[in-house]
Amino acid sequence: MIIGAMNDPKKNVAEEVALFGEMGFDYFELTIEAPGAHPDKLMREKKAIQDVLSSYNFGVLAHMPWYFSVAHPYPSIQEAISKEFCRAFDVAAEFGAKKATLHSEFLPSGIQERQVHTAKTIETIRKLHKEAEARGIELLVENFNASSFSIKDFKQLFSEVDMGMTFDVGHAFTSDGEGMENYLAQFRKRVKHVHLHDNDRRTDQHLPLGAGKVDVARVVKEIRAFYDGTITLEVHSQDRDYLRISREKLEILWYGKKKFEENKEYLQPEAKKN
Ligand SMILES: [Zn+2]
């Protein structure tokens, strides 16, 4: 398992990379999102960002704006958004990303017939999956909630498009999230990336691990039983120290306290002298 963190798109990307590098994260999940991480800005600052990324030996995963529609009721608007998705894939490829995550629709599903909403989502994702693939990127779809795209909808999507998913633990635990076990019972083989954060088991709060009501120890046990890949801590607290604390909690739960201490000693031998 390797642990990453995601930039706040309102902040300077190079500074975000340096912050996570100093905290000892293993990779960087780049959300390609205005204003701080707009595609044009990322391309202008490419050299500076890449220098910081390589100084921390960071690989990059890409994340698309969560509010970009995939089932917009106006075809011309969806077309424009899909073009922006492709521009983000271009930039993701420039930064060496091999995987990109996109959310299901965030607009309320009630504005069009449910079947239409689902069919449009699948159609857009099918196209974008191909576009990403053409750029050497594996597109992953992330669970949000049942109103947006339910387990039943995911089943339909995966029967039509052979693709992986980003399993978002926090989203699964919201009141409209359908539960971790239900997702994993169906899609554990599709999980190629994980987002982890805490909440009150009602709303999507992106809290530090242990600050909400999600049983993180149980989550780690479940995930660890079948998965050993990238886990991004999507903790959106203003005080970024909570990212570091969440990282330590995850490592201790994953490896056990003893192994965690040994790993730390191996990776940061100078820390022992102090
Ligand atoms: Zn997420």
Image: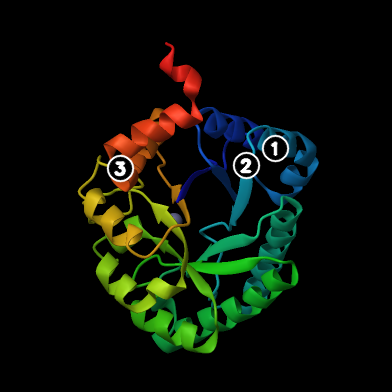
Picture layout, residue 151 above or below residue 198: below
Please tell me which residue lies in front, 203 or 216: 216
Q: Quadrant of ligand 1?
A: bottom left
Observer-nearest of 219 and 210: 219
Report the amino acid beneath label 2. Phe
Q: From the viewer's perspective, is the residue at label 1 or at label 3 nearer? A: 1
Query: Which amino acid, mark 3?
Result: Leu
Q: Position of residue 116 (x, y in %)?
A: 47, 87
Residue occupying the point 69% across, 63% down: 84
What x and y, as percent, mark residue 40?
76, 48
**Left or right placement of residue 33 versus residue 174 in this view:** right
Q: Is residue 203 visible?
A: no
> Are the residues flagged by discs 1 and 3 in contact, CB closer than 8 Å?
no
Q: Residue at x 59, y 53 (%)?
A: 61
Residue 41: numbered disc: none
In the rendering, which numbered label is found on residue 209?
Answer: 3
Q: CA distance from mark 1 to mark 3?
A: 28 Å
**Colour pattern of the rendering:** rainbow
Mark 1: secondary structure: helix
- Residue at mark 1: 54
Q: Are marks 1 and 2 in contact (CB under 8 Å)?
A: yes
First along the sequence among labels 1 and 3? 1
Residue 159 visible in the snapshot: yes
For disc 3, the neighbor class at 10 Å (few under 14, some 14 to 19, many from 20) is: many
Picture residue at 33% right of the left edge, 55% below the top: 170
Is 72 drawn above or below residue 115 in the view shown?
A: above
User: Which residue corresponds to mark 2?
Assistant: 58
